[in-house]
């Protein structure tokens, strides 16, 4: 048995996580999820096999042993839902893909494992009017809130809705992007880069915030800052939307990510192209973008009916 095959699983995991951090530049939350999933997998194997888990053992696992892990997570003390179980299986697959390249570890039995079937979730965008109200409310001065924070909140939400950014993408922007131009370069999921056009309203909102922010904008520092000057976190953005939806009487689905959903749905409803939207959102597959067409199918049918030569337009 080769020396590499004797490598303990926990040591291989450390190397794998560092690869994800350094080369794929995944977020800390994503890295933590990979680590939790794989720690749980290796712990199950130690109990199931009653021996140390190393690369040799991982190379020779049977399909039944993979299934036993998934079954244990499904019915354990803290059972995983189908979506979490699918993520856990995805973590295992990613680890094995890396192990094959790094240590020549391949296990064909893993290809026999099917993940749980997931119900297709439908995005819940805001209406056009509600989106306008959210942006207006975010820009309204509030007692006890510093003007620069009001400007920050307005700029952030305008950017999410105006460019369809994920909250993590907006918060990852640095001073190197300033001043914002007509096109913004975004590094999204999987370290993929895309170019997103910026509306004048979004550029102006960010410029107003930058001019009022009391902290210097350095090339490697976050544009959006917390009250003490550090990088603004996603939780602060979530609390902002919680406050706004409470004032406006909006449902719990009105989250920062709902503004991205709203951007996509409203763009399609206005006659936007599905392929172009795929590029703007940074979706790898068109099927991920297609779901937005389902959200507002009635609007798309009206556009089709109006534009198509065989539609029901008055002749």
Image (cartoon, rainbow, N blue to C red):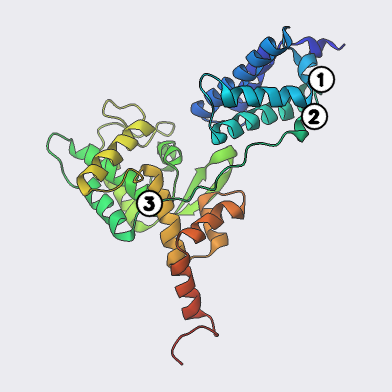
Residue position marked by numbered label 3 in the rendering:
161
Instruction: Indicate which label's residue lies in the foreground, 3 or 1.
Output: 1
Instruction: Indicate which label's residue lies in the foreground, 3 or 2.
Output: 2
Secondary structure type for disc 2:
helix
- Vertical arrangement, residue 273 with respect to residue 140, above or below: below
Residue position marked by numbered label 2 in the rendering:
109
Relative to 160, 132 lies left or right: left
Task: Say whether disc 3 or disc 1 marks the residue closer to the N-terminus.
Answer: 1
Task: Say whether disc 3 or disc 2 marks the residue closer to the N-terminus.
Answer: 2
- Vertical arrangement, residue 192 with respect to residue 101, above or below: below
> Farthest residue in the top direction?
51
| Residue 133 % position (x, y) | 25, 54
* Residue 230 appears in view: yes
Residue position marked by numbered label 1 in the rendering:
60
- Vertical arrangement, residue 91 with respect to residue 148, above or below: above
> Who is closer to the viewer here, 128 or 143?
128
Task: Say whether disc 1 or disc 2 marks the residue closer to the N-terminus.
Answer: 1
Name which quarter of the figure residue 190 lies in: top right
């Amino acid at each position: 048995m080769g020396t590499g095959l004797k490598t303990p699983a926990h040591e291989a995991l450390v190397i794998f996580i560092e690869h994800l951090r350094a080369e794929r530049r995944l977020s800390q939350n994503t890295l933590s999820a990979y680590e939790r999933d794989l720690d749980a997998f290796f712990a199950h194997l130690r109990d199931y096999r009653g021996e140390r888990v190393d690369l040799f053992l991982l190379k020779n696992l049977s399909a039944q042993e993979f299934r036993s892990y998934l079954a244990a997570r499904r019915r354990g003390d803290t059972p995983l839902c189908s979506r979490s179980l699918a993520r856990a299986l995805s973590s295992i697959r990613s680890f094995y893909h890396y192990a094959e390249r790094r240590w020549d570890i391949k296990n064909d039995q893993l290809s026999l494992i099917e993940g749980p079937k997931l119900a297709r979730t439908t995005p819940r965008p805001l209406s056009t009017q509600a989106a306008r109200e959210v942006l207006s409310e975010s820009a309204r001065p509030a007692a006890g809130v510093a003007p620069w924070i009001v400007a920050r909140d307005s700029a952030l939400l305008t950017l999410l809705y105006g460019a369809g950014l994920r909250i993590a993408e907006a918060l990852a922007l640095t001073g190197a992007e300033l001043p914002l131009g007509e096109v913004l370069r975004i590094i999204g999921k999987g370290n993929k880069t895309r170019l997103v056009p910026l509306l004048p309203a979004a550029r102006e909102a960010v410029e107003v915030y930058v001019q009022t922010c009391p902290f210097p904008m350095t090339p490697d520092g976050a544009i959006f800052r917390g009250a003490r000057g550090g990088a603004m976190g996603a939780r602060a953005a979530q609390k902002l939307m919680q406050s706004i939806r409470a004032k406006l009487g909006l449902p719990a689905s009105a989250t920062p990510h709902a503004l991205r959903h709203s951007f996509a749905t409203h763009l399609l409803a206005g006659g936007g192209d599905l392929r172009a939207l795929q590029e703007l959102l940074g979706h790898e597959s068109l099927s991920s973008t297609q779901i937005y067409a389902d959200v507002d199918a009635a609007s798309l049918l009206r556009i089709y009916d109006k534009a198509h030569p065989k539609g029901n337009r008055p002749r």
